Amino acid sequence: MIFRFGYHNEYEKYLMEQMRADLTIHSYMMEMTIFFAWLGRVHPHMELHDIGYSTVTQFIEEELKAGRQVSTVNKKISALKSYFHFLWLKGVIGLDPCAKLKRRPDVKEEQAFSLSDDEIDFLFHTIGQDAAAKNNEKVYARNMALVTLFLWGGLRIQEASNLLWSEIVWQGDSAIVGISLGNIRRIVLNEREARYLRTHKGLSEDATFVFTSRQGERMSPRSMQFILNTLGKKAGLHIHAQKLRNTFVVHKLIQGYSRDEVADMLGIDQLILPEHVMEEIAAQR
């Protein structure tokens, strides 16, 4: 008999609508099954609306004491935050017990070449929660557009800083981004990849630069990195522009693009990666 937690099918559909990767969906569903099996054993009479911050942290602490690796526990935290946010959106619970739950510091994650799918998902979730707390759709759209341009466009931070709206051509819901700083090239973003950029465009009030300061001027690379650092700290992740650009590289190579093709996308002559990164990519192809 397979144990099913509350709103199992609805939650799986929610993850699919959020365009989560298949492996992420499978992982989250499994982690929530594990959590509710633990809950039934430790707190057998607890209802969904009774689950609080102390309950989820008790589960996390027990997992750590059981010898689980920090990276494994962090995946559990990502799943918990996603599920209870879903319940909150659905109106099943009045307070989200995981709203203040953060990933545990992990030296290996900090030193990693790129972000995992789980970390990307957690970062997006954090950006959404941060904007919701401030009730600021404009900040949410800007931050998501900024992060996704690095993740799915492979931009350098200087290129993002100097990017003009006039350099973006819309084809339906997709976008072709022209990079005029440094090596001239074009980046194609599909509908899913371009949706945050499109929303940001609609809220930008005819700005010249894609990313602007409060004064309406071009946002500097320093300011962009400050935003990334702030979001990373709130998520418990080590985030910087180059790491997001590296993630773009890893995803393209896993998808089957050659080193030369990815180098062209990045606007560089040659793509050189650490040996352990290439081994990890080969294992996922």
Image (cartoon, rainbow, N blue to C red):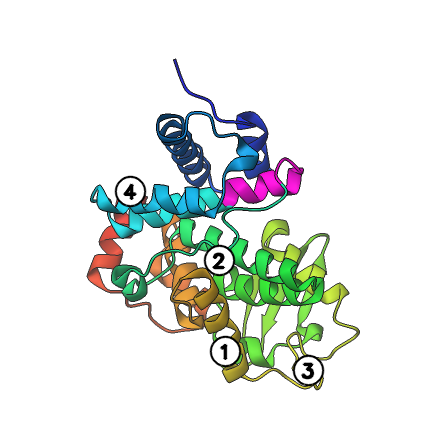
Under tag 3, what secondary structure?
loop
Count of numbered labels shown in the rendering:
4
- Mark 2 closeness class: few <14, some 14–19, many ≥20 residues within 10 Å: many
Which of the two residues, 59 or 25, is positioned nearer the viewer here? 59
Circle 3 sits on which residue? 214
| Dot label at residue 62 | 4
Give the mark toward the camera: 4 or 1. Answer: 4
Magenta residues, start to end = 82-93
The mark nearer the N terminus, 3 or 4, is: 4
**Image quadrant occupied by the C terminus:** top left
Give the mark toward the camera: 3 or 4. Answer: 4
Residue 267: x percent and y percent?
Answer: 45, 72
Q: CA distance from mark 3 to mark 1?
A: 14 Å
Give the prevailing secondary structure in the magenta stretch.
helix
Residue 207 appears left or right of 40: right
Kindly identify the residue that appears in the image at 37 percent across and 54 percent down: 253
Q: Is residue 19 visible?
A: no
- Mark 4 closeness class: few <14, some 14–19, many ≥20 residues within 10 Å: few
